[in-house]
Amino acid sequence: MTHQETLRQHTRGRGTYDITAEVQRVVRESGMRTGLCHVFVQHTSASLIICENADPTVRSDLERFMTRLTPDGDPIYDHTLEGPDDMPAHVRSILTKMDLTLPVGEGRCTLGTWQGIFLYEHRHAAQQRRVVVTVQD
């Protein structure tokens, strides 16, 4: 059996957005007790991460690291069609992945105690993102 739903997530610009509750809702509503949950973001300038959900400084530290690793406006980039954050956003999404596969047990994603699922927006401007959640037994 397979259940699929597309989530819509509005972002306010670069940063992380906790989507754990929405993903867990889709899994719960699928009715499946055991299986896999696949989460996929349909964009090339946003990604998905599993990250600590208790201390937000983990995510702000991650952002500072990514800023150092992929600076906006770096002259090495030719692809700047949509601005100085365009190519860095693509690099960030490739490095952090656009999909996650999570085990489902007892009708929910079996995340660890401090783990959350986050949409990681890499563009500075607000965006409307689509995240496809597929649950299979």
Image (cartoon, grey):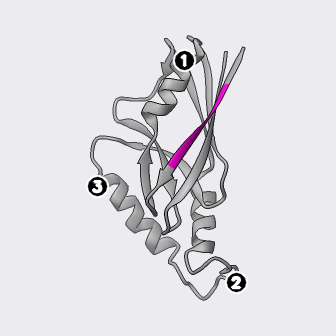
Q: Position of residue 34 (x, y in %)?
A: 58, 13
Q: Quadrant of residue 45?
A: bottom right
Q: Is residue 77 above or below residue 124?
A: below
User: Does the magenta-highlighted stretch encompass residue 37?
Assistant: no
Q: Position of residue 53 (x, y in %)?
A: 34, 41
Q: Residues within 10 Å of mark 3 (few under 14, many from 20)?
A: few
Q: Quadrant of residue 75?
A: bottom right
Q: Residues within 10 Å of mark 2 (few under 14, many from 20)?
A: few
Q: CA distance from mark 3 to mark 1?
A: 32 Å
Q: Is residue 116 above or below residue 47?
A: above
Q: Amino acid at mark 2?
A: Asp
Q: CA distance from mark 1 to mark 2?
A: 45 Å
Quarter of the figure with the N terminus: top right
At mark 3, the secondary structure is helix
- Residue with the mark numbered 3: 57
Q: Amino acid at mark 1?
A: Glu
Q: Which residues are magenta?
A: 4-9
- Residue with the mark numbered 2: 78
N-terminal label among 3 and 1: 1
> Which residue is rendered at x = 56% and y = 11% of the image?
33
